[in-house]
Image: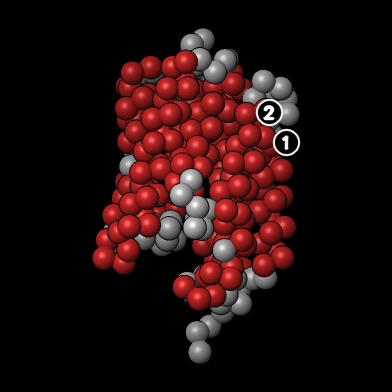
Amino acid sequence: MTPRRSRLRSWMLLARISNLPTIWTNVLAGLALTTEGPAWSSYLWLAASMSCFYTGGMFLNDAFDRDIDHRERPSRPIPAGDVSASEVFGIGFALLAAGALLLVPTPTALPWGLALGVAIVVYDMRHKGSRLGPFVMGLCRGLVYCTVAAAVAVVTPVVLLAAAGLTAYVAGLTQVAKLAGASARWLVPALIAGISLVDAALVAFHAPLVLAAAAVLGFPLTLFLQRFVPGD
């Protein structure tokens, strides 16, 4: 009989915390894209907000997929009996609320944050069997750029174009994940980590290269963390 995981370990798996460096580099890129110059003093609280949205979405992903996971991924925390679905739902929605609350002091960003929250819930509820699932997943990432930019300046056409590019990248990797199957399990984590390289390229065009180098570090950091906490 497989021993039950600790609650902390279960939460780490549910949150897919190994992918958080890609969220932090998303925030770097979103700040770099602002026309008024990067407001780096805002980085920490925006990174905290976006991290709440991301981890909340990951919790809800497992909560909504619990019946499928019982059949296809019985080692996930809910079907394994490590945590209850009600607990995971509660934590997931609480994290989304925390992400939105962190945006309340910046009314220009709050609508974008609420749109992000809606997109996350729609994806988690409907992505299985939906052709639009990969697009909605990508949209969630693209909205991070828009939310961050709106928090410190305005959402310009440049920001929207960058968000569209990130949306396409993430939608593509989501489609790859569906098609690759077990034969290419290594590919999806690498593509997820590659989000930081997309961010780094954008930062390099709009901010000092030292910040682009910091974004590049998100790639190996994500791959390293995925060795301990799977990110898919």
Residue lying at 51% horizontally and 89% vertically, measured from the top left: 1
Query: Which residue lies under the disc numbered 1?
Result: 101
Binning the other alpha carbons within 10 Å of mark 2 as few (below 14), some (14 to 19) or many (20 upward) gives: many
Q: Nearer the viewer, residue 73 or 136?
A: 136
Q: Which three-letter amino acid code belongs to the residue tagged 1?
A: Leu
**Residue 138: x and y, percent?**
46, 40
**Residue 154: x and y, percent?**
57, 15
Query: Which residue lies under the disc numbered 2?
Result: 110
Question: Compared with residue 230, is residue 106 higher up or lower down, i.e. above or below?
Answer: above
Q: Nearer the viewer, residue 151 or 211?
A: 151
Check the picture and name the quadrant holding the C terminus. Answer: bottom left
Q: Residue furthest top?
A: 36
Question: Compared with residue 153, is residue 22 higher up or lower down, i.e. above or below?
Answer: below
Q: Nearer the viewer, residue 86 or 22?
A: 86
- Frontmost of labels 1 and 2 is 2
- Can residue 134 be spotted in the picture? yes
Residue lying at 32% horizontally and 36% vertically, measured from the top left: 197
